[in-house]
Image (tube, grey):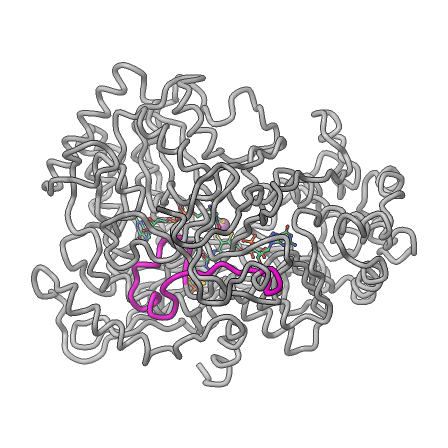
Amino acid sequence: MSTYSRRKFLKISAATVTVASGAAGAAGAAASAKAAAAPDKPSKRAAQGVQRIPTYCDICFWKCGAIASVRDGVLWKIEGNPEDPLSRGRLCPRGTGGIGAHFDPDRLKRPLIRKQERGQEVWAEVSWDEAFAYIATKMHAIKETYGPESVAMFAHGIGGNFLKHTLKAFGTPNFAAPSFAQCRGPRDVGFRLTFGEDVGSPERTDIKNAQCLVLIGSHLGENMHNSQVQEFAEAVGNGASIIVVDPRFSVAASKARHYLPIKPGTDLALLLAWMHVLVEEGLYDKEYVAAHGFGFDQFAARIASCTPEWAYPETGIDPAVIRETAREMARHRPATLVHPGRHATWYGDDTQRSRAVALLNALLGSWGHKGGFYAPSSMDVPGYPYPAYPKPAKPKLDNPGMRYPFAHEAISTGIREATITGAPYPIKAWFTYATNLIQALPNEDETIKAIKNLDLLVVVDVIPNEIAGWADVVLPEAVYLERFDDLNVELFREPFVALRQPVVDAPHGQKPNWWMAKKLAETLGLAQYYPWKDIEEYLDHRLTAAGMSLADLKTRGIVRGAPQPTVVEEGASLAFETPSGKIEFYSLQLEKAGFDPVPVYTRHAEGPPASFRLLFGRSPVHSFSRTQSNRILSDMMDENEVWLNADMARRMDLKSGDYVCLRNQDGVVSNRVRVKATERIRPDCVYMVHGFGHTARGLKHAFGKGASDSQLVTRYATDPLMGGTGMNVNFVTIEPEAARG
Ligand SMILES: Nc1nc2c(c(=O)[nH]1)N[C@H]1C(S)=C(S)[C@@H](COP(=O)(O)OP(=O)(O)OC[C@H]3O[C@@H](n4cnc5c(=O)[nH]c(N)nc54)[C@H](O)[C@@H]3O)O[C@H]1N2
Ligand SMILES: Nc1nc2c(c(=O)[nH]1)N[C@H]1C(S)=C(S)[C@@H](COP(=O)(O)OP(=O)(O)OC[C@H]3O[C@@H](n4cnc5c(=O)[nH]c(N)nc54)[C@H](O)[C@@H]3O)O[C@H]1N2
Ligand code: SF4
Ligand SMILES: [Mo]
C-alpha cells in the first residue's frame, strides 16, 4: 500500500473528522484497552514473532478482505488484503480500528440467563450446556402449543447463516433483517420495477468511471463503504463532475461542482423536473430508450407538467440550476451515474422516489454502460448438501395477504407487529443475531411491547448492547477476528471467494456462531442437519465442490475468478427481467396493483411550529450502534453532535459546544448532546450521527455519551409498496440541558 494512496483515501473523510492517522492512534488505544481485557488463560497461539493471517472484516457488511498481524501471540494490526477486489489493499478507518473489538473490556464473556424482569439487565452466568438446555426446553414448549412457526429470527450479516439453518430445520419460515424494511428495501424494489433487477450489495455502481456522479443524500466519505469511497476519490481525481443534493453540506458536497441544498423530503419533485428537462429539451438517450424502453410516451405525458418552475417552490432549488444540472448530466451520458443510495427509507414514498432515480438513469442510458451500472458476477460455489427442511404448516407472517405487494424480502417490522397483535398467528420466541433491534427499528416502544409478549428472547451478540438488556438468554459470540464464518461469495465487478478465519483466540471462551448453531440443533434433536464435524470440514466440502481447497484459501484469504464482461463497452449484453422484457418507464404491474405507474410527487407534512426535521446519517469512524464501545474508534469520536444552522443557533442564543436536549413531537426527550452550529445545514432541519446515546448499562464506556436518534424516531411512514419504514418524519425542538429533569 503506498502512502500516497492511503492519504488520498482518508482525505475524503477529513472535512468532518480528524482521523487519528492509522496505526499510531490505534496502537495506543489498543494498549490501554488490552490491560482491561485480560484473557481467562493465555492464548494457545502464543507463537513468537509476527504472523500475518488473511481474513475479512466485519465492522460493516462490505466484508473487505484483510490481513491481520499477530505479534508474539497478541493481535497487533489489520490492513487491507491487496488481492481483494473490495478493499484493494486498504481498509476504511473503521476496519483499521476493528481490532478494538477484540480488546473491548466490556465484551460479553459468558452465557447469561435472566434473573429479574426483562430490561433490568440482571443475569446469572451459566454454562453453555445450561444455556442450550434452557433454550431447547422453551422452544419445545412453544412448538407444542403454537407450532414451530412461532419462533422468529432477526439477523444482520453473514454470521447469521448457521443459526438460520438450525431454525429452518426446527420448522419456522420467519426470518428478517433490518437491512430491508429499514434500509435498502425501497431502492431495491424501485430498481426491480424498472430494470427487473436491483443494484445489490456491494452496489453495481461504476463510480470510478463515471464522468458525472449525482449523489442524492448518499453521503460517501461519511458513509464509508470502502470500494465506493475509493472509487469516489478516483472519480474526483479524474475530474468527474459531481452533483450533490443534500439539505446538509456533506463531505461529498465539499467535492461537488454543483451543490443543491434541497428542502428535505422533496427529492421526488427535483427528479421529476430533471426528467422533464431531459425529455422536453430532447437531451435523453433516444436510441437507448427506443431500443430498451417500455411505455415511454405515457411516461413523457405524465411528467409534462413537472417543470423546474413547478419544482422550485417545493424543493427551494432555482429553476435555472435544475436546468443546468440536467444538461450537465446529459453532456456526460451514458457515463452519468445517478447513485441509487442505500439507506433509502426516508419518507414512506421511497420506492417511488427510488423508481424515479432508476428512470433518470434510464433516460441517461447508464444502466449497462461504463460509468453507470455494470453487470456483476460471482463464483459458483455450491451450498452444502443438507437434508431437506420440514415444510412449515403456516406461511411466513411478516406480510399477511401480501399487504405490501412488492416486498420480495421479509419485513422486520411486520414480524414485530405480528408479535404484538398475535395475528395472523402468535410469535413467542425471537432470536436476534448481530442486530440491535432497539436502535435499528423505529419506535422503540413497539419493539419493547412485542418483546414483552415473548416467552423467549435469545440474543447473540459480542457486547451487552440495548437488545441484550431485554434478553432471557444472552449468548456471547467470539468477534470476527476469533472465528471462521461462511464463505463470502458476493456478486461484484469480478468473481471472488473470501474466507474469514480466526486470527487470535476468544479471550473468555466466547464461541463462534456456527458452533452455537450446531450445538443448539443437537440439543433440539436435529443433529442430522449438521453432518459435518466442524466448520473447517463444511468449508472444505463447499470449496472442493467448486474446485478449490480450504488449505489454499487459508493462506491466500481470497481466490479470484476470471473477470467477465461487465458493461456493453466490454461486450456485455442488456437484458431486463421485467414483465415487458424492457425498462419500464410506465409500469403496468404498479397500475394493476393500484399504484402510480409513473412516480407522482406528493408533499409531506411539516412539523409543529419552531421545530426542526430530524435527519441522521453516518460517521466515517463508526458503524451503526455497534462500535461506540470500541476504544480505538471511540478515541476518534466519543459522542455525536447535533448540527444546527448557525443563524438559528444565534437566534436561540446557542453556540457550538453547548449541551442541549432534543424533544420530539411526541414528547420524547433525548440525552444531552452538544450543538454544532454551522452554515452547513439548512435552517429547517437538524442532523446527527446514528448509533450514540447508549442506554445499556453494561456498555460502561459508551453509556450515556451523545444522543440517540433512534429514541426520537417514534413515528415512521410505511411505504405502501413494500412495507419500508420511512424514518425522516420526526421533528424536534431544542431545549436547554436542564429541561430533561
Ligand atoms: N434511527 C435509525 N435507525 C436505523 C438507521 C439509522 O440511521 N437511524 N439505520 C438503518 C440501517 S441503514 C440499517 S442497515 C440498520 C442496521 O441495524 P443493525 O444491523 O441492527 O445495527 P446495529 O444497531 O449496529 O446492531 C448490530 C448489533 O450487532 C452486534 N455485533 C457486532 N459484531 C457482532 C458479531 O461479530 N457477532 C454478533 N453476534 N453480534 C455482533 C452489535 O454489538 C450490535 O448490537 O439500522 C437501521 N435503523
Ligand atoms: N462509516 C459508516 N459507513 C456506513 C455505515 C456506517 O454505519 N458507518 N453504514 C452503511 C449502511 S448499512 C448504509 S445503509 C449506508 C447509509 O448511507 P447513505 O445511503 O449514503 O445515506 P443515508 O443514511 O440515507 O442518508 C444520510 C444523508 O442523507 C441526507 N438527507 C437526509 N434527508 C434528506 C432528504 O430529504 N433529501 C436528500 N437529498 N438528502 C437527505 C443527510 O443529510 C445525510 O447526508 O452507509 C453505509 N456506510
Ligand atoms: S468498509 Fe470498512 S468497516 Fe466495512 S468491511 Fe470494509 S474495512 Fe470493514
Ligand atoms: Mo443500511
Relative placement, left or right, of 7 versus 465 is right
| Nearer to me, 687 or 223 | 687
Q: Which residue is farthest left?
A: 41
**Point 37% across, 28% down: residue:** 450
Which quadrant, please, contains the N terminus?
bottom left
Q: Which residue is farthest right?
A: 281
* Quarter of the image where one finds residue 132: top left
Q: Is residue 382 magenta?
A: no
**Point 35% across, 49% down: residue:** 542
Instruction: Residue 42 in the image: state x and y as whole percent.
Output: 8, 65
Report the label total: 0
Mark yes or no: residue 19 visible: yes
Q: Is residue 624 magenta?
A: yes
- For the magenta stretch, what is the residue range? 622-648
Instruction: Residue 366 in the image: state x and y as whole percent.
Output: 73, 57
Q: Which residue is farthest bottom?
A: 3
Mark yes or no: residue 149 visible: no
Relative placement, left or right, of 9 versus 479 is right
| Nearer to me, 227 or 470 | 470
Where 100 falls versus 584 (above or below)? below
Relative placement, left or right, of 574 versus 22 is right
Instruction: Residue 257 in the image: state x and y as whole percent.
Output: 72, 71
Instruction: Residue 127 in the image: state x and y as whole percent.
Output: 10, 41
